[in-house]
Every structure is written in structure tokens, then in C-alpha cells.
């Protein structure tokens, strides 16, 4: 199986270039990329933080879940549409 790799460097921090696989988990033809894992962890941390703030302010945490169920998929869809609109020459074929 072909693994795509990328070279990353942080010259300002004195870290030389190193190689990173683009996929974290591969099961057969199914793979999860690093960026997807990082975005998912960020969403979960944000929800946890907002959940705690909701409870501290006396709001119902269930309202947050209702909001998240609507907003997270809408945000993903909106980001994908934005990407397609500004790359129309590639996707018009």
C-alpha cells in the first residue's frame, strides 16, 4: 500500500525537517488523515469547554447539543462548498 508522506520543518524553532505520514489509521481501503483527527479533537474540546460554561451560567446543556447537531455538519458542508466554488476549474470537468 502506498503511503503519502510530507516533510515538515520549523526553522525558527531550530527543528530540522522530518517526514510524516499523511494517514494516521488505515484499515483496508479506509484511512483517517492527520488533519481530520486534529479537527475532530478540536471540535470535541470546544464542545467540552462550552458544555461546562453552559452549566456554569445556568443554561441547559441539551440546548448546546441541539445547536451542535445543526452547526457542525453545516460548517463542514459550508467549508466544502467554499472549496469547490473557488476551485471550479478543477471540479467543472
Image: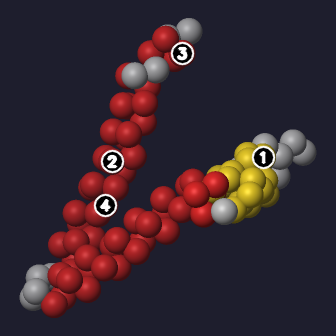
* Badge 2 or badge 4: first in the primary sequence: 4
The label nearer to you, 3 versus 2, is: 3
Taking the spot 11% from the left edge, 82% from the top edge, the residue there is 59
Quadrant into which the C terminus falls? top right
Q: Quadrant of residue 85?
A: top left
* Badge 3 or badge 2: first in the primary sequence: 2
In the image, 44 versus 34, the foreground residue is: 34
The label nearer to you, 1 versus 2, is: 1
* Visible residue check, residue 21: no
Q: Which residue is mark 1?
A: 5
Q: Is residue 80 left or right of residue 12?
A: left
Q: Which mark is residue 90?
A: 3
Circle 4 residues within 10 Å: few <14, some 14–19, many ≥20: few
| CA separation in Å, label 4 and label 3 | 31 Å
| CA separation in Å, label 1 and label 2 | 28 Å
Quadrant into which the N terminus falls? top right
The label nearer to you, 2 versus 4, is: 2
Taking the spot 26% from the left edge, 86% from the top edge, the residue there is 52
Taking the spot 44% from the left edge, 15% from the top edge, the residue there is 88
Q: Is residue 17 left or right of residue 13?
A: right
Q: Which mark is residue 69?
A: 4
| CA separation in Å, label 1 and label 4 | 34 Å
The label nearer to you, 3 versus 1, is: 1
The label nearer to you, 1 versus 4, is: 1
Helix, strand or loop status at disc 2: helix
Circle 2 residues within 10 Å: few <14, some 14–19, many ≥20: few
* Badge 1 or badge 2: first in the primary sequence: 1
* Badge 1 or badge 4: first in the primary sequence: 1
Asked whether the residues under the numbered discs 3 and 1 touch, taking CB atoms below 8 Å apart as contact, a structural biologist would say no
Helix, strand or loop status at disc 4: helix
Q: Which residue is mark 2?
A: 75
Looking at the image, residue 59 lies above or below residue 44: below
Amino acid at each position: 500500500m502506498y503511503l503519502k508522506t510530507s516533510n515538515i520543518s520549523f526553522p525558527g524553532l531550530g527543528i530540522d525537517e522530518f517526514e510524516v505520514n499523511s494517514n494516521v489509521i488505515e484499515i483496508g481501503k479506509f484511512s483517517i488523515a492527520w488533519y481530520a483527527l486534529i479537527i475532530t479533537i478540536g471540535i470535541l474540546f470546544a464542545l467540552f469547554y462550552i458544555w461546562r460554561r453552559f452549566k456554569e451560567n445556568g443554561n441547559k446543556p441539551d440546548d448546546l447539543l441541539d445547536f451542535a447537531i445543526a452547526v457542525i455538519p453545516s460548517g463542514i458542508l459550508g467549508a466544502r462548498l467554499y472549496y469547490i466554488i473557488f476551485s471550479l476549474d478543477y471540479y467543472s470537468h
